[in-house]
Image (tube, coloured by chain):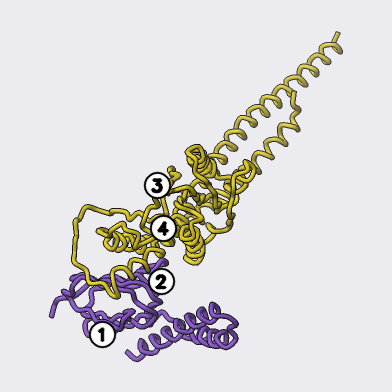
Amino acid sequence: MATLRDIKRKIDAVKKTAQITRAMNMVAAAKLRGAQANMEKFHPYADKFREVIFRLASGVEQDGTFDLLTPRDDVRKVELVLLTADRGLCGSFNHNLITLAEKFLLEKESEGYEVTLVTAGRKGHEYFRKRKFKIRKSLTGLLNKPNYDDAYSLGRELIELFQTGEADEVYLIYSQFVSMLRQVPTLIKLLPVVPERESEESQQLEYLFEPSHEVLLNDILPNYVYVQILESFYQTAVSEHAARMTAMDNATNNCNEMVRDLTLVYNKARQASITKELMDIVGGAEALRK
Amino acid sequence: MAEKILLEIVTPERKVVSDMVDIVVAPGEMGEFGVLPNHIPFLTKIKVGELRFKVDGRERYVAVMGGYAEVLPDRVTILATAAEEATDIDVIRARAAKERAERRLKEAKDRLEFARAQAALQRAIARLKVAEKGRGA
């Protein structure tokens, strides 16, 4: 049976852990606020962009004029970009993303496609490196402060892969932030570009384009890819902080519960030792009296 | 003359302007263009430069760092890579950026470096120009 001192030591240790997890929870909360504010400031831009691109791309013939819009007839090489966090201690956040990625990769492989992976985030990289997947490139530190430059250089590279035929399709897995308690791993197709239909406001306005429709669309399509990537950065960053906050909150609660249980054990043990001592004294006294 | 258009300038970082205005003049790729209410739908690329608009007779200036403009009868949306209103521009920083760009332009070794320096210089010049006009108004 554990001695009193052992139990006491254990209680102190758990209390210290609780302190750390509580601190991590608060740090995550602070970072979450910042990330969320940034994400919201980006929203109007992304929304507007989607609107414009849809208007530009609707009614365009899929005749190969716009290489970024045209699906390939013969798809062999598939590229997957996987966003994960660089750090752990955020519950099942990374695991959920990795699971979706693995499912996708295995599925595509079994269908005979050649799949390569670009990992953005240390956790995804570690997982797939161990399993000997073909990793083309590994990026880290993107989610600390999502910015346009990072999204641009990643997007630039992906477009090049697509245009040189190194990849016939490019997908992206990121974590969509739904609420504090729900972050959904999501798969989207980056290339060829699929313009999203926002609403059914059949606004078939006759536009004046300057310079021309083609030039404008060809110019704006790559930018749309960057916008989508940046948006996924923001969403994933916010998701990560939310997941960590929840995970650390749970951990803190568990610690507190453990402290309560251990304190109970401690008090019982203390009481038992007191009782035992008393019995000894009483026993001793009885023996003397005789 | 009560008619106005909604001008929105958005960048990846924030919404810079969202106001009802009388007229917008933007630096289009193919030349500067002005927009009054009931303009026909129009979509174009804009370059680095100065955008100005008028609210109740007062002119305001914004430095835009390239992007796209969408014009509808009742509104103008500018999707800019970056944009700053004249009053928000840090002149000292812009001046330093200009000098830096000029130096880099001289020292540029290849075409890519040269193009980068040139773009930076253009942005710095646009900023300074807009900042100056903004103060005059």
Amino acid type at mark 3:
Val
Above or below: residue B31 compared with residue A136: below
Rendering coords of residue A126 (x, y %): 62, 46
Q: Which of label 3 and label 1 is nearer to you?
A: 3
Q: Which residue does the numbered mark 4 point to in the structure image?
A: A228
The chain to which mark 3 is attached is A
Above or below: residue A185 compared with residue A197: above
The C terminus of chain A lies in which quarter of the figure? top right
Q: Which residue does the numbered mark 2 point to in the structure image?
A: B81
Helix, strand or loop at mark 1: strand
Q: The chain coloured yellow carries which letter?
A: A
Earlier in the chain: of badge 3 and badge 4, it is 3
Q: Are dots 3 and 1 on a single chain?
A: no
Q: CA distance from mark 2 to mark 3?
A: 27 Å
Q: Residue at x 35, y 59 (%)?
A: A64
Q: CA distance from mark 4 to mark 1?
A: 37 Å
State the mark number for residue A178: 3
Q: Residue furthest left?
A: B1
Q: Are dots 2 and 3 on a single chain?
A: no
Amino acid type at mark 2:
Thr
Q: CA distance from mark 4 to mark 2?
A: 14 Å
